[in-house]
Image (cartoon, grey):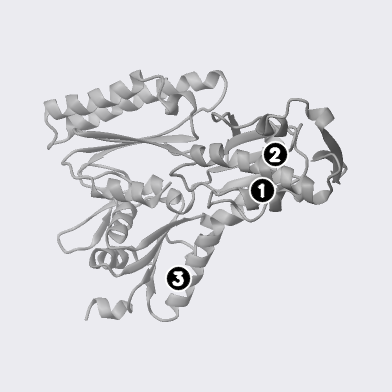
Amino acid sequence: MEPHVIQSLLEESSEICVSIYMPMFRWGREKQQNEIRYKNLLRDASELLGNDEVCTASTRDVIMQRLEEFRAEGTHDAWRHPSAGLALFATPDSLEVLPMGKRVTEQVHVGERFYLKPLLPAMHGDGRFVLLAVSQNHVRLFEGSQEGLEERSPDDLPENLKDALNIDEFTTALQHFSYTEGGHVDTMYHGHGGGEDDHKQTILQFFHRLDDPISEYLQDRNDPLVFAGVEYLFPIFKEAISYSHLLPDAVTGNFDNAKPETLHEKALEVVQPFFQKNTTEAIDRYHNAHGQNRATDDLETILKAAEMGAVDTLLIREDAAFWGHIDDQGHIQEDGTPNEVSQDLLDDAAVATLNHGGDVFVVRGEDFPVKDGSAAAQLRFEVGAMTS
């Protein structure tokens, strides 16, 4: 997910903001349950809007109509090709629908701004990726996430080398060149009288023909692209493809007959280190700042620092929430569960950090730098300077 998407939600101005998160079933008959779950969440949203002291009956009706109309649009890609999760953000004037690459907890929030904490993992890659499995015999494109792969068929994407190069008499016009990797044979082709250089040019031309439909399909996206194919092909593919988020490591082998489950398992070995890299570096910076008195894991201090613009990087423990409020003396009071006065203070800290140009990372529990903490912050100056 592009950072500007979250930034636009931060800047949304409305007295009433509705945030809805729902996990989705992606395959088979279970997909029918998505609409049932959505209806239940709409009922929850209507009840919360009805209990909100600021929300008028007419405002509730307008928001609910927007949400109902989205459900009626069965042709929307969110229903036809479900992601692992779905997020919706509604005001009386707008509705934003965002597919999510990871499953989320089912929840509805109503407030004066959107509840954004479940989106935060997507700021540094939410586990979604695209995989292209290529040989001269087959071209297959998949949308990938932590949960699995789903095949896509973009317009104009050639099915194989013959289709890409419009070769009518394919088997007679070209000679065969076999390349073996791991006990599998992938057949290469080159013109009569040609050598390996001619063969490379043929493959390069093939990959150039893939570039336009791939680039169009991935337009305005920053999801990593994973190449799957025999090792010989990957350097040629890198030369031909213009998409800037192609991962430097490939899934190597012949996958003409591979099941999506096999490809998914191998792809995760490539994408997981990629997604984890930035988080690991942020944790290291926190440890270094702690030794310089420019870090804290005290939530009350973090909230004050975030409001001052003093938080450079905020780390939040995955799946953590802290429902509470700030009392008249400016101290945190923990409420335990949501109520009419409580807010998720981790969400407040994240929003304040982002509004002042800081960065936020959601960290797995086993990697979190503070044993029992839910938040940790690297500060832009020493902790003592905040009270001086």
Residue with the mark numbered 1: 237
Q: Nearer the viewer, residue 94 or 209?
A: 209
Crowd around label 3: few <14 · some 14–19 · many ≥20 (10 Å): many
Residue 125 placement (x, y as % from top left): 49, 50
Looking at the rendered structure, the secondary structure element under dot 2 is: strand
Q: Residue at x 85, y 37 (%)?
A: 175
| Image quarter (top left, top right, bottom left or bottom right) of the C terminus | bottom left
Q: Residue at x 47, y 30 (%)?
A: 24
Q: Nearer the viewer, residue 82 or 315?
A: 82
With 354 as the anchor, is 270 left or right in this view? right
Residue 30 placement (x, y as % from top left): 53, 21
Residue with the mark numbered 3: 286
Lower sequence index among marks 3 and 1 = 1
Q: Is residue 121 visible?
A: yes
Residue with the mark numbered 2: 134
Looking at the rendered structure, the secondary structure element under dot 3 is: helix
Residue 80 placement (x, y as % from top left): 47, 23
Measure how far apart labels 1 and 2 are at the Cα level. 10 Å
Looking at the picture, which amino acid does disc 3 mark? Tyr
Residue 73 placement (x, y as % from top left): 36, 20
Looking at the picture, which amino acid does disc 1 mark? Phe
Lower sequence index among marks 2 and 3 = 2
Foreground label between 1 and 2: 1
Looking at the image, residue 252 lies above or below residue 214: below
Q: Nearer the viewer, residue 155 or 141?
A: 155
Looking at the picture, which amino acid does disc 2 mark? Val
Lower sequence index among marks 1 and 2 = 2
